[in-house]
């Protein structure tokens, strides 16, 4: 069970509205997901099943947007979990939560450091209004795959939106970053790989791959320039 599952059990469970029925089995991973839709108290094992689910055994049933749908459910669960974790009744369980955290996370923070932050969060009145989740800005694109030797559908970063996110939400500095400061890997129309920094460490990857003269290509046109006008190819490296 993952660390989130252990914290859930330490909390006595988390109330969450499971968005859909979930039925998936993967014997190779010994992974079995069987959850019913609805609002109920989840155990740690229940929580890990909900967080890992993407589609049923019958792949026609699942999140229409795949991994992005799973991310939305994960964020919704973490919102519910943090909201319940911050309740004043959990003050007496802080030490137990920290022990679970330290057993699963590599950090240079001491037990006392973490304890202080936890006490400030709970006793200081931190609410979900102060907590925000963001997903990497993205769009879909068709990308030449060096592995499959044809065009594949990918979810790729939207560089301009990502840059704005870094500058407005993530960076603790007053300095404003530019695209050249972000190492966004891209694949060009000829299949060669480039970076927004202007340098690719792997020289072989920077060269165009050997492709069939008439590769299988989807009906939609493969973009060669970023829809936001970024000075890099928008499609990330295919591996």
Image (cartoon, rainbow, N blue to C red):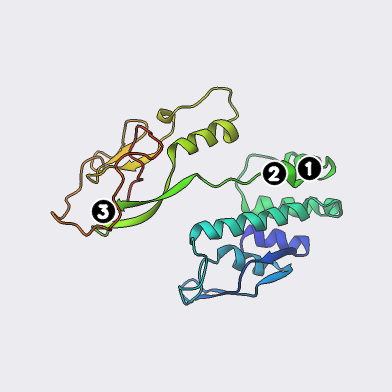
Quadrant of residue 182 within the rendered picture: top left
* Mark-to-mark CA distance, 1 and 2: 9 Å
Disc assigned to residue 146? 3
* Mark-to-mark CA distance, 1 and 3: 48 Å
Residue 194 in the image: state x and y as whole percent. 30, 38
Residue at x-position 78% and y-position 39%: 116
Q: Residues within 10 Å of mark 2 (few under 14, many from 20)?
A: few
Residue at x-position 20% and y-position 48%: 209
Most foreground residue, 44 or 109: 44
Q: Is residue 239 visible?
A: no
Quadrant of residue 235 within the rendered picture: top left
For mark 3, give the secondary structure.
loop
Quadrant of residue 228 within the rendered picture: top left
Q: Which residue is mark 1?
A: 126
For mark 1, give the secondary structure.
loop
Residue 96 in the image: state x and y as whole percent. 77, 55
Residue 116 vs 25, above or below: the answer is above
Q: Residues within 10 Å of mark 1 (few under 14, many from 20)?
A: some
Q: Earlier in the sequence, mark 2 or mark 3?
A: 2
Disc assigned to residue 131? 2
């Amino acid at each position: 069970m993952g660390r989130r599952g252990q914290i859930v059990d330490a909390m006595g469970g988390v109330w969450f509205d499971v968005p859909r029925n979930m039925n998936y089995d993967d014997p190779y991973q010994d992974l079995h997901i069987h959850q019913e839709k609805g609002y109920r108290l989840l155990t740690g094992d229940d929580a890990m099943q909900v967080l890992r689910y993407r589609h049923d055994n019958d792949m026609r049933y699942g999140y229409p947007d795949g991994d992005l749908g799973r991310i939305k459910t994960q964020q919704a669960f973490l919102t519910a979990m943090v909201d319940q974790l911050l309740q004043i009744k959990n003050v007496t369980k802080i030490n137990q939560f920290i022990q679970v955290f330290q057993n699963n996370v590599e950090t240079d923070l001491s037990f006392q450091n973490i304890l202080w932050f936890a006490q400030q969060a709970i006793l200081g009145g931190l609410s979900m209004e102060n907590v925000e989740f963001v997903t990497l800005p993205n769009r879909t694109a068709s990308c030449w795959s060096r592995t499959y030797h044809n065009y594949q559908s990918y979810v790729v970063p939207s560089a301009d939106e990502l840059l704005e996110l870094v500058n407005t939400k993530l960076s603790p500095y007053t300095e404003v970053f530019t695209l050249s400061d972000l190492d966004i890997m891209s694949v060009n129309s000829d299949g060669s790989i480039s970076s927004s920094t202007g340098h690719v460490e792997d020289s072989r990857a920077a060269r165009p791959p050997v492709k069939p003269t008439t590769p299988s290509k989807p009906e939609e046109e493969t973009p060669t320039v970023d829809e936001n006008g970024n000075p890099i190819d928008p499609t990330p490296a295919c591996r």
